[in-house]
Amino acid sequence: MDVLNEFFTWSFERHHNVLSWYIRPLFLLPFCYFAYKRSVLGIIITLIALFTSMFWFSKPSTVDPKVEEFLAMEMDYLFGEWSFIKILLSSMVPLTMFALAYAFWRHSWKYGILVINLIAILKVQWSLYAGDGSGESVVLPALIGLVFCNLVIWIAYKVVKKKST
């Protein structure tokens, strides 16, 4: 169990590097692509990359106090008591990811873009609510990721639509 705790501590220290916060929304793009192509293996590989991306970057030499406060809140959330409401709220993550995959699997660009926007909005709202003032640290990476994802998906839609005509 010590090895698992050491690994978690090592990886969580690297998650303080906000570069990992900026790249995480970008994983939604290959996730959507592989769902559109109906590649379960591609979806699984993307999810593994997403989950491991929190420790791809080095531990930062300095950490913004808001980032530190927000991540401390996340730790408390993860390792605190789990009530029915907390389980229900946390189940939104896999449910929205399933909905996103399903929308693109069915080639529904409209519902896919709706779900991707819903995911970002819910993430920001939860972060602001649960993190009090520290939740503000999530807003910029989430919004930049959302704008970029919307743009890329819109361009992909236009390309696919043009090829089909």
Image (cartoon, rainbow, N blue to C red):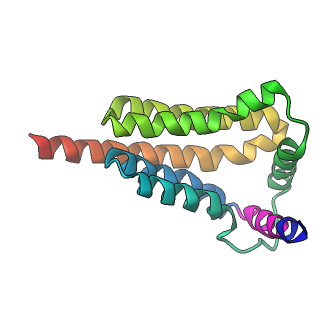
Give how far across and how far down residue 81 sits, in percent: 91, 37
Residue 126 is covered by the magenta coloring = no
Task: Give the farthest residue toward the front.
Answer: 1
Residue ID at (77%, 41%): 135
x then y, percent, for residue 103: 39, 34
Q: Is residue 11 or residue 149 the one in the foreground?
A: 11
Residue in front for this viewpoint, 161 or 10: 10
Residue 142 in the figure: left or right of residue 125: left
Q: Main secondary structure of the magenta part?
A: helix
Q: How many marks?
A: 0
Residue at point 42% right, 42% down?
Answer: 150
Vertical order, 117 against 21 (above or below)? above
**Residue shown at the point (68%, 62%) measured from the top left:** 54
Expressed as whole percent of the image width and height from the top left, the position of residue 96 reads 55, 34
**105 or 73, which is in the foreground?**
105
Q: Is residue 86 above or below residue 94?
A: above
Q: Image check: 158 left or right of 42?
A: left
In the picture as drawn, the residue positioned furthest to the left comes out as 165
Q: Residue furthest top?
A: 85
On the image, which quarter does residue 164 sit in? Answer: top left
Q: Report which quarter residue 51 is drawn in.
A: bottom right
Residue at 85% x, 29% y is 83
- Residue 16, given in percent of the width and then of the height, sits at 77, 62
Tell me where the magenta segment starts and ends, as one range: 7-17
Taking 59 as reference, is 149 left or right?
left
